């Protein structure tokens, strides 16, 4: 099927490539200026901040106390030797009581 009377029989106008290029360039410059304006109006930079939870603050205090505590190096060496030789025995009840006491001191609960 043939199509007749396209453009009502008038000759087709040639495309003005110069005009098309000018329009494209105009659009690009408008987009660039809009982007520049948007970046200039952007919100001011926020400052970063950090806050520690209460338990993290407590842990930090415990670590400071632990690093400041005096160390009986002679006792540490004696226990190391006993562990290496297999002579060191752990009393599970005494250990559990000491762990519970430490937790009560750190977290403020009563046992």
Image (cartoon, rainbow, N blue to C red):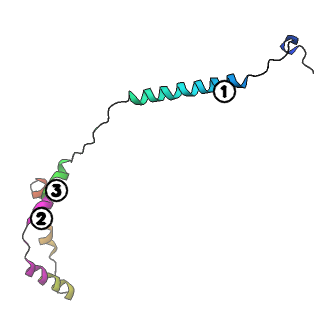
Q: In this view, does 49 lie to the left or right of 104?
A: right
User: N-terminal of the two: label 2 or label 3?
Assistant: 3
Would you identify the image quadrant in which residue 2 lies? top right
Q: Where is residue 30 in the image (x, y as percent from the top left)?
A: 53, 24
> Magenta span: helix, strand or loop, mainly?
helix
Q: Where is residue 109 in the image (x, y as percent from the top left)?
A: 11, 53
Residue linked to disc 2: 66
Q: Which one is in front in this view, the residue at disc 2 or the one at disc 1?
A: 1
Which mark is drawn over residue 60? 3
CB contact under 8 Å: marks 2 and 1: no
Q: Which one is in front in this view, the residue at disc 1 or the one at disc 3?
A: 1
Front one among 92 and 48: 48
Residue at horizontal 12 percent and vertical 64 percent from the top? 66
Q: Is residue 35 left or right of residue 102?
A: right
Farthest residue, direction bottom: 85
Span shown in magenta: 62-77
For residue 62, above or below residue 3: below
User: N-terminal of the two: label 2 or label 1?
Assistant: 1
Question: Which SS class for mark 3?
Answer: helix
Front one among 78 and 98: 78
Q: Would you call the spot at circle 1 few (<14 residues within 10 Å), some (14-19), or many (20 or more)?
A: few
Residue linked to disc 1: 21
Q: Is residue 51 left or right of residue 34?
A: left
Asked if residue 73 shows in the view, the reply is: yes
User: N-terminal of the two: label 1 or label 3?
Assistant: 1
For residue 10, above or below residue 25: above
Q: Is residue 65 magenta?
A: yes
Quadrant where the N terminus is found in the figure:
top right
Residue at horizontal 17 percent and vertical 48 percent from the top? 54
Front one among 91 and 16: 16
Quadrant where the C terminus is found in the figure:
bottom left
């Amino acid at each position: 099927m043939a199509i007749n009377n396209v453009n009502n029989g008038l000759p087709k106008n040639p495309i003005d490539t110069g005009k098309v290029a000018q329009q494209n360039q105009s659009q690009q410059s408008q987009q660039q200026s809009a982007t520049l304006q948007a970046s200039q109006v952007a919100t001011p930079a926020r400052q970063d901040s950090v806050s520690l939870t209460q338990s993290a603050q407590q842990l930090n205090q415990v670590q400071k106390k632990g690093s400041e505590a005096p160390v009986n190096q002679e006792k540490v060496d004696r226990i190391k030797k006993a562990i290496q030789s297999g002579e060191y025995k752990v009393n599970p009840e005494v250990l559990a009581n000491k762990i519970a006491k430490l937790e009560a001191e750190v977290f403020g609960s009563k046992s």
